[in-house]
Amino acid sequence: MSASADKLVMMANQIGRFFTPQRDADPAVAIADHLEKFWDPRMRAAIVAHVAAGGTGLDAPVREAVGRLKKPSA
Amino acid sequence: MSLVHEIDYGTPASKSAETVKLTIDGNEVLVPAGTSIMRAAMDAGIQVPKLCATDSVDAFGSCRLCLVEIAGRPGTPASCTTPVAAGMVVSTQTERLKQVRKGVMELYISDHPLDCLTCAANGDCELQDMAGAVGLRDVRYGYAGENHLELEKDESNPYFTFDASKCIVCSRCVRACEEVQGTFALTIQGRGFDSKVSAGAFGDNFLSSECVSCGACVQACPTATLSEKSLIDIGQPEHSVVTTCAYCGVGCSFKAEMRGEELVRMVPYKEGKANHGHSCVKGRFAWGYANHKERILNPMIRESIDQPWREVSWAVAIDRVASEFKRLQQKHGRLAIGGITSSRCTNEETYLVQKLVRGGFGNNNVDTCARVCHSPTGYGLKATFGTSAGTQDFDSVDQADVILIIGANPTDAHPVFASRMKKRLRAGAKLIVIDPRRTDIVRMPHIEAQYHLPLRPGTNAAILNALAHTIVTEGLVNEAFVRDFCDLDAFEHWATFVSEPQNSPETVGPMAGVSPEAIRGAARLYATGGNGAIYYGLGVTEHSQGTTAVMALANLAMATGNLGRQGVGVNPLRGQNNVQGACDMGSFPHELTGYRHISDDATRTMFEKLWGVPLDNEPGLRIPNMFDAAIDGSFRGIYVQGEDILQSDPNTVHVKKALAAMECVVVQDLFLNETANYAHVFLPGSTFLEKDGTFTNAERRINRVRKVMTPKNGMADWEITLAIAKAMGFEMPYNHPSEIMDEIAALTPTFAGVSYDLLDKEGSVQWPCNEKAPTGTPIMHIGGFARGKGNFMITEYVATDEKVGPRFPLLLTTGRILSQYNVGAQTRRTENVVWHDEDVLEIHPHDAEERGVRDGDWVKLDSRAGGTALHAHITDRVAPGVVYTTFHHPETQANVVTTEFSDWATNCPEYKVTAVQVSPSNGPSEWQKDYAEQAEQSRRIATKVAAE
């Protein structure tokens, strides 16, 4: 993991709190898009692993978004 | 080469569209109505003798030298104060005028030292020139009468002297201080023969007065009364080169006036479109760091950070960088290394660093210091308007009716633009300031903000939503603008959101520490006061909701229709000289030049074809992510060009740990900065005086940087990056930075028309500059947004996780001071330290009283991240519960205290909100002492051995 799980969870939840009230129909899509566009693959891999381990601390839309992340191509 | 001479037209240009035809000395002249006769004459190439007139200030009419005769009018009116009229017939040289002028000059010279040969202004003295112009050959009165020749010099200012014996009391300095700078530090004291220029109040000298050393008075002085000390020391320059200041994001144009390869002085360039001939203390005078004894001129290496440095050849140093980076990638993978571009370096240099990382390192682990300042601007404005940049040019402020400043302190951080702003405010524009601190512009000579909202740090988004609430619920929305130019669904959604009760001033005000009436008043003024212009700085971006607040500002501008014309807009005041450029040049890990995402196949393919290498389509690590990855062990090596991450990034202890964990830290800088304490290779950098390139300022203006001397370190920064790339096996064959710009233009639609030829022709251009806008774009989003329809975003207020509590009951916010710049690496190595030689902690009298702290006491400043100690300054500039300091001095290390909380979208650190405690102290903390000792150890340089 490239950063502590707590830190990644906090960062992901911050993102979630921004996108959840936006008018997009599905905040999870917007959150996943943001993570894919701005998080380095090792950070995404770490948050995916965190969800696989139970996802403690992650807000629901964020957890859902992490589940939608595509596998890094490289 | 020769000196760049600028014409002094004597009085400012008229802005009238109407023209007037007149005759001057038999020549027909057509000029704008309102032009002075003096200026009209100069337009026709006729120089009327003058002393008290110069075109940077309004006409004064005191010297009586510029008299003319006008057919049909009695007397000899002053040509500077007399406007042209249709059909006027003017004579500038008649027998009568000659006699009058000679008499005037005779009086001036009778009370002036006759030391022309040894005078610093010899060869560049208007008094001398005028004596010649009027044919003065004799002074009938002699020199023995009462005079001012024995008056003392004031040499208190570190950069210029005031020699009263040479003063002709023309008031040009006083007027420049008032009209150009807006400080009002100078006055004429006394009457009649006793009249003299005086700085400040009785008993003051230039240093102790309110003078901000902008240099406007020195520039305006027609004699040697106010002279640069460097000019006195060196002598008159023999050639000059127009270049761009390397300090703040205003990007002032200067003439570097040279004698051989020695810089005599920096003189602001009147044709400079960002500064129009004005300057501040940093750009005008604080360039001495370029020759400072601590500047490192030879490359150095060491195996570990506890060893002293060893000077080596460039070849050895570059080979060490390449071999170490290759070793790290071989051992830890392609993603184990990265680089940081510098907002102090040129566009071409930042472009090369990101190209090296993407093409040579094979990953996207490149970031820039804009990460920690304006990255939320890029994200927020792109999401709402479609372009990651401010909307206006600086000149736009002249048309503003209401100026809203939030989280910015322009008089300190962007002083030259602040002078323009102050001029507009003195002319009647209204002012709203949203800032936890009572910054100078809230109340200063002839300026008083209509509203100052001293909000609690961290509540920007809430306050901006409350402003929006007022605008929407009170029916102040510019419906036509929204209907024509914005996404209506997004607007409706947003309008519903901001209308909710939790966003009302009555709910937000008490929470944010601002009266609801003031919020409503400010909102009404911004929405209805005419052209409303927003200017903001790091007090907006450096928050956990930095991006949200940027979007909230964009929402306000769209809702009120304050976009797409002069006098309005959303204007980020960029911190460093090339923050905008560094962002434009693809320095962010997720974006190529022109803000195009790395995952976009078409864009990436274009770069791959030209660069001849495949590129990773995944975003790389941002600076804070690099630190985390270093501590975790997956990031092992870094190339840092021109940024001191240890001093400038938050939570110093964390940054130290990250740097110490890396196996190869390469620092390229002018000095052994704090980051270099943890470096293994030091590559000496070049100053802005030693290289060619371009900087892009806060108004998207691309300005040329021109080399005026040979790099003292042997290589310009761009050449160093080329050498590393070559050693890494990724050759980038450029012979001159102009070729790099040509490549940028070929790859970047918004830069497609930019070339050095165009910049030389136009002076500067603002991007987008392409087929649609061949000479650039001063104002963005005219008749529609870059993204199509303006996009209102929901900006829900989320309180920061950084909370005050019993252990840390105060909120610390940080900022800058006029005389120092960023981490102070440059300005601390100049005479500017006379104004600010240490960081101090501003604390409200109530908070100081509670803690038994007196003004000037040492105090401990502790947060959850760490602690430091510094002197206290008790002031009600800050509200109770808020303390403030600067971050210019490594001895203080203000960032030991700041935390790693960051903006949700960009990871821009939340420097502006840290929960702290302040308590009395006896002196520097143990941490500071240990740090100083370690820094000293780390900066040891071993004696060079004969052979390498």
Image (tube, rainbow, N blue to C red):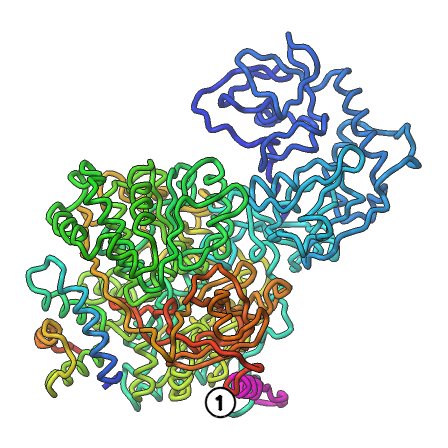
Q: Is residue B259 above or below residue B40?
A: below
Q: Position of residue B670 (x, y in %)?
A: 54, 71
Q: Is residue B282 above or below residue B303?
A: above
Q: Residue at x 48, y 65 (%)?
A: B844
Q: Residue at x 14, y 83 (%)?
A: A56
Q: Residue furthest top?
A: B72
Identify the image quadrant of residue B627. Answer: bottom left
Provide the chain ID for the residue under circle 1. Answer: B
Q: Residue at x 57, y 48 (%)?
A: B268
Can residue B352 be seen at all in this image of the molecule? no
Q: Position of residue B83 (x, y in %)?
A: 57, 21
The residue nearer to you, when weighing B3 against B496, is B496
User: What residue sits right under mark 1 in the picture?
Assistant: B305
Type of residue at label 1? Ile
Residue A54 is inside the magenta segment? no
Quarter of the rendering occupied by the N terminus of chain A: bottom left
Q: Secondary structure at mark 1?
A: loop
Identify the image quadrant of residue B396. Answer: top left
Q: Is residue B622 above or below residue B283?
A: below
Quarter of the rendering occupied by the C terminus of chain A: bottom left
Q: Residue at x 31, y 73 (%)?
A: B803
Q: Position of residue B768 (x, y in %)?
A: 32, 48
Identify the image quadrant of residue B350. Answer: bottom left
The residue nearer to you, when weighing B449 against B307, is B449
Q: Position of residue B272 (x, y in %)?
A: 50, 45
Magenta region: which residues?
A: B928-948
